[in-house]
Amino acid sequence: MDLEKRLEIIKKPPTEEIITESELIELLQSKDKIVAYDGFEPSGLMHLGSGILRAIKIQDFLEAKIDFILYIADWFAYLNNKFGGNLELIRKAGEYFIEGWKACGVDVSKVKLVWASELIKDNEYWETFLKISKVVTLKRVLRAVTIAGRTEAEVKEPSLIIYPLMQATDIFMLNDKRGVDICQLGMDQRKVNMLAREVAEALGKRKPIAIHHHLLIGLQGPTKMKSFDEDEKISAQISFKMSKSIPKSAIFIHDTEEEVREKILNAYCLPKQIENNPIIEIFKYIIFRKFDSVLIKREEKYGGKLEIQSYSELEKLYSEGKIHPLDLKNACIEYLNLILEPVRKHFEKGKARELYEIVKNAQITR
């Protein structure tokens, strides 16, 4: 596969930015075995963003001949007080995440699974952690706490200061011990990737390449914006994202057909509006990544059935008012249920069902 094709696959939605593209091109040209990683706090049920969307992007990297590590950040969930800091539940949730990725289409035999609790056992981990803590300011670390879903004003415990220092340590340790070249995380994690790039030279390390993917907006649409980033658009994306701690904002991978229908019908979706429209985003980042075309079933008096061949065509037609929000929603319901049906079946029995029940019945804490 040539360089242009690999780059094209990497840049497919939901990829939103590459820091930097020139460094990525140089990496693709100079190195045979390239490794990327993404990290996850096991902190609750998986939704479209953490499940389906991530499976789509992981498959892109595998197709582009890049190895992938799924990093299960159990100790980070503990620092962030997920499940009330119950490590046993957090680790069960980590096992549930593995089953979730399988169900969503990740061939786990082709990726590596690494737990934070394994990585921190390496003696070099804490040496690297301390070195990073010596070359950054407290103000810079506080700016990065937003990666834990907190604003600077919400920091009350030292654990949230430790959090970004540990994640920066992860980046260098995963590079040194597992060959990771690329940090492929959500836009909400960009501040720690930038922190790692800033301190790399002082540590005598190579700057990681950062590839950030879009965060699906929650079904509630734009809400009150918090101060997560100096860039207003990034801050809005983090503020409005689909969240497992706000159940009505999310389509969970286990939702029944009727639950999907009810949530989508109640979702924010203004006529002709593309920006901050959760239904439009589901089409762009999920449905059109799974299907080559979609069928919008309109009543004959409104033009009848409409087969759409690409997301750009859908966006144009919707922005012109040629597709009604209800028709768009009905199509979204149909295609989402097709995508989620094998996921539901995966969790009907065995270990997957057991883990799902444990996580579902646990008290989710923010």
Image (cartoon, rainbow, N blue to C red):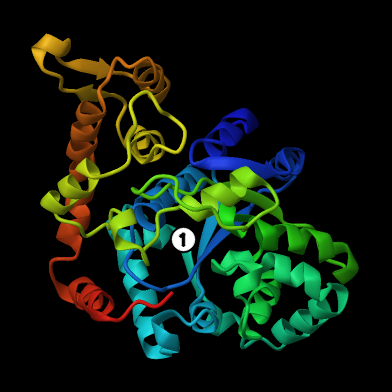
**Residue that lies at the very extreme toward the front in this rendered image:** 224
Q: Is residue 165 left or right of residue 212?
A: right
Quadrant occupied by the C terminus: bottom left
Q: Is residue 238 left or right of residue 312?
A: right
Please identify the quarter of the rendering in which residue 300 is found.
Answer: top left
Task: Indicate the position of residue 275 as horizontal and vertical percent values.
Answer: 47, 33
Element assignment for label 1: loop
Which one is in front, 208 or 86?
Answer: 86
Residue visible at 36% across and 56% down in the picture: 51
Whether residue 1 is visible here, answered yes or no, is: no
Task: Indicate the position of residue 343 as horizontal and vertical percent values.
Answer: 22, 56
**Depicted 334 relative to depicted 294: above or below:** below
Tag 1 residue? 111
Please identify the quarter of the rendering in which residue 253 is found.
Answer: bottom left
Task: Indicate the position of residue 351 as horizontal and vertical percent values.
Answer: 21, 76
Which one is in front, 340 or 151?
Answer: 151
- Residue type at mark 1: give it: Val
- Classify mark 1: residues with Cα within 10 Å, few (<14), some (14-19) or many (20+): some
Residue visible at 35% across and 21% down in the picture: 318
Please identify the quarter of the rendering in which residue 330 is found.
Answer: top left
Task: Indicate the position of residue 363 as horizontal and vertical percent values.
Answer: 31, 81
Whether residue 127 is visible here, answered yes or no, is: yes
Quadrant occupied by the N terminus: top right
